[in-house]
Amino acid sequence: MRKLEAVKAQLLAVEALKSLRRVMSGKEVLELLESKGLRITQVDLSRYVTGTVLPSPARSMKILKLLSEANVLGLAVKQALVMDERGVVNVTRIAYDTAVLGLAAARAYTELNDLGVTKVLTAAVNGIPLAVKISHVLDADLCVARQEPDVSSSGYLEVRYFAPDPPRYAHLYLPSFALREGDSVLIVDDLLRSGRTLKALTELASQKRANVKAVFTLVAIGENWRSSIPRTASKILVALEVKET
């Protein structure tokens, strides 16, 4: 492991443990790690969380992998999730939760770092914090599609799709320079339900002959979104799946 990658793993492990401590007690964190085969002391956990000591690169990678296997991100999302009787999800509360974002960054690094992602593509606005965190840990450029064109850009990629509530045609615009042919793209979305946004983002990528390698979402509701998964995607990461009400 290169020096920079080693330090990144150490910092991500510390951030993940700090984020996990916001949704679990210290005892629960230690029990979780021990159940996965890693025993650390309460003193070590406290030192890691406070930043007094960094876990070794090898231990850091083990911590990240164990937390990914245990899907602690899903636990954090579930604790933050509120869905009313109409099936409306409190997306903002989840998308801007710093514990969720910290665990999401660790999960993305652990499971997607070997894909060679060059661009992280999302739709404004709630997907932006998640996409920023993930693009940073993957050393990839961030691409944000918006519902209105940016007047500072001279050219755009555009896609139109039907949005039923209220019934209308919605548009996504992406500056034409944001993607290039051959880019390896990770699509990031805070919530997948109908799959319309996922399909639209995939179409934007295809306009530049960029390859969608993976999809990352915090919450997926029902099954309808699955029909919009790009055929080129080799990994689909869903933190929490919820049955349609």
Image (spheres, rainbow, N blue to C red):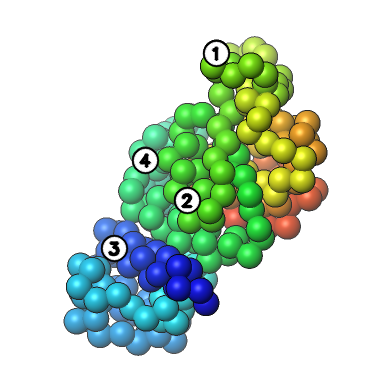
Provide the residue designation for mark 1: 151
Q: Residues within 10 Å of mark 3 (few under 14, many from 20)?
A: many
Query: Closer to the camera: disc 4 or disc 2?
Result: 2
Residue at (44% x, 48% y) in the render: 133
Tell me the distance, in whole angstroms, between the alpha carbons under discs 2 and 3. Answer: 19 Å
Mark found first going from the N terminus, 2 or 1: 2
Toward the viewer: 8 or 42? 8
Which residue lies under the disc numbered 2? Answer: 136
Q: Which is nearer the N-term, disc 4 or disc 2?
A: 4
Could you say which quadrant of the image residue 152 lies in?
Answer: top right
Query: How many angstroms separate mark 1 from mark 4 (CA)?
Result: 27 Å
Separation of residues labelled 4 and 3 (CA atoms): 16 Å
Residue type beneath disc 2: His
Identify the image quadrant of residue 145. top right
Q: Earlier in the sequence, mark 1 or mark 3?
A: 3
Q: Nearer the viewer, mark 2 or mark 3?
A: 2
Three-letter amino acid code at disc 1?
A: Val
According to the image, label 3 marks what residue?
18
